[in-house]
Image (cartoon, coloured by chain):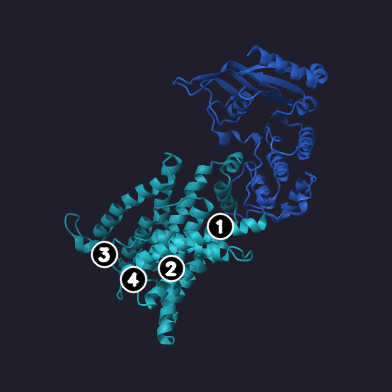
Amino acid sequence: MFEFLGALDVILQDGFMYAIIAMGYYVSYTILDFPDLTVEGTVLSGGVAFGLLVTAGVNPWIAMTAAFLVGFIFGAITGILHVKLKIRPLLCGILVSTALISVNLVTTVVGMGGNLAGDGALSTIDVGRSVPTLIRTFPATLLPTDFFGINPRKIISFFVIALIFKLILDVYLKTKNGLLLRAAGNNPQFVTMLAKNEGRSKILGLAIGNGYAAVSGALIAQSRGNINQGMGIGMIVIGLASLIIGLSVFGRLRFMKPTTMVILGSIIYQACLGFATFMGVPSAYNKIIMAILFTLALVLSAKLKTKRGKINA
Amino acid sequence: MLELKNIKKYFNAGTVDQVELFDHFNFNVDRGDFISVIGSNGSGKTTLLNLICGSVAPDEGSIIFEGKNITSMNEYKRAEFIGRVYQDPQMGTCPELTITENMALADNKGKIYGLSPAVNKKRIEYYKELAAQCGMGLENRMNIKVGALSGGQRQALALVIAEMTDVKLLILDEHTAALDPKTSENVMKLTDKMVREKGITTLMVTHNLRFAIEYGTRLVMMDEGKCIMDLSGREKEKASIDDLLGKFYELGLEK
């Protein structure tokens, strides 16, 4: 029983934390139809920014906001490459995420006080027990540390943060600016007719998507207790798979907001991974399982779409 | 009001396939004109509209709007005073947004798209009145996605939306061509009613000769980048479909 609760705790924690990347993809991929590869870099950038700030004693909520801004700026760069320099979406993401490998490494080493000539040891930032992260500061400290054998601080903090970012996105998409963004993804010519530059909406959408990815990076850092340079690998697949699972499984439910679907999709995805671990599959196989799950999600969503099309026709 | 002066436009410039469409082309639109433009495929009608709207730039010459040179102005900036309805009913609205949302976006044109709520509930009655003009019962379906409407309904809505934004010049790019005959007739009547009521200056490209004869105050026929017929006033009233067909036939023989 305790074992099951423990597994559920991990699945929900991971579900909420990765759901934020998936919500970012809801903006860049679903609304703007932009397959954004920058995320692999910005998840780590968010983690690095957060880690360096909290270890320097900055309030973790402020550090998380800073992580958002860092991701926001790098996402905007991807958008500018696409809109102003007319580079294809996939290449923009590859260019920026490649550059970010250096940016993240240099920031980490320099931020940790090392020198770039040889401090490989300083490429990891420790945010373990001694560091006051979100789950170890107010208001999480109001919660007990033991609840039927599990520590509820992490899961509740992550839930609240995912919820906050979900609500912000829901409200934003109902504003004039948000509606213009949706129009830009839906029919760019319509935005032009409104005497607005549709390119600007695209840049903003990519900035938001990567801001969300970076916030997720800040949570991943806290969940793992450290930030290493390989942290971003696989994040594109996790984010997109969660998004696509959520939208295809719950897409028919009119009353449900897409952001809610995305969070649930993320939990389902983590539950599948958790189930594999539970069945005794070694963690070395994790990425294969992730790729297979993503493939299944894509096939499933395509199948559901044609089915739905037939019903409507 | 609008003046195109000495326009030159090449396609595939610098290659062996270079085509010169416009050479020292001049065209004037006066305030209050409702001009129908006809002509065979490749005669330069759509390019003329693209030049005016800014989706294509001329190689030489200038475009003057109300005394202001707009030759190098961006398409989206020109949209502040030029509205356009396309042949494809998909182009004039956002399919994933509801009728209300589409209208709310258009209603805010010229203002800042900030962080206030997109749909102002007080305006909904006004949007319903506008939608009712289409005579298609759209006013009762304000909260459904525009993608669920038929082509004719979407085109009527696109027209209402284009006019909602108080543009000074309305461009209709074969806007009835993709519709069935009855819907096409209805959309054309709606167009005429709205243009008359608002007195908006309009340039309409059409392949429907009857529309060109029956509606509008001026009729222009284009061929190979030139205006070969320009009728207004009594001349336009006297013109018949047979005259136009005769002219087309003549052009065919010359080639």
Residue A37 horizontal/vertical position (percent):
40, 53
Q: Is residue A16 visible?
A: yes
Q: Position of residue A140 (x, y in %)?
A: 43, 76
Residue A172 is tagged as: 1
Nearer to us of marks 4 and 1 is 4
| Residue occupied by mark 2 | A17
Cα separation, mark 3 vs mark 2, equals 20 Å
Please name the residue that numbered disc 4 is placed on: A224
Residue type at mark 1: give it.
Tyr
Read off the residue under disc 3.
Answer: A124
Label 2 packing within 10 angstroms: few (<14), some (14-19), many (20+): many
Going by the numbered disc 4, the residue's amino acid type is: Arg
> Are both tags, 3 and 2, on one chain?
yes
Tell me how far mark 2 sits from mark 1, CA to CA. Answer: 21 Å
Which one is nearer the viewer's eye here, B205 or A272? Answer: A272
Q: In the image, are marks 4 and 3 on the same chain?
A: yes
